[in-house]
Amino acid sequence: MEYGSNLINAINDFTHNVKTWNKETFGNIFKRKRNLLTCIEGLQKSQAQFYSHNLFLLEKDLITQYNATLFQEKLLWFQKSSVK
């Protein structure tokens, strides 16, 4: 009986660790995508009134992050569709 409880404990520990890793590494992809898009839109509105090279570079970086997030979201949906 002890071996069965050790296996259950190991599975529970693994599940907890994977969930923690997922939150810390990826977080909520959809929330991150919304936040990045909001920042990009704000920068673009600001740039329309007053050009700043630093804001341009920041916008470029945020767009790169946004594209990476879109790719992660695509992978997420692909993995979810494969499971079903």
Image (spheres, grey):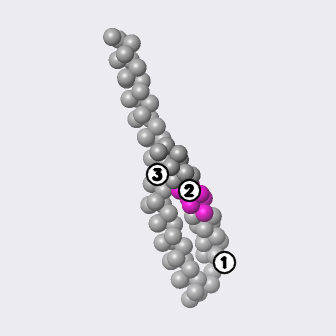
Q: Which residue bears the numbered disc 1?
A: 53
Q: Residues within 10 Å of mark 2 (few under 14, many from 20)?
A: few
Spot occupied by residue 33 in the image (x, y as percentages of width and height): 50, 63
What amino acid type is highlighted by mark number 3?
Gly
Q: Which residue bears the numbered disc 2?
A: 74
What amino acid type is highlighted by mark number 2?
Lys
Mark 3, mark 1: which one is toward the viewer? 3
Where residue 42 is drawn, which disc sits there?
none
Q: Secondary structure at mark 1?
A: helix
Q: Which residue bears the numbered disc 3?
A: 27
What amino acid type is highlighted by mark number 1?
His
Question: Is 28 in front, or is 84?
Answer: 84
The reply to whether residue 24 is visible in this rendering is no
* Labels 2 and 1: the sequence-earlier one: 1
The reply to whether residue 70 is visible in this rendering is yes
**Circle 2/circle 3 CB separation < 8 Å:** no
Magenta segment: 67-74
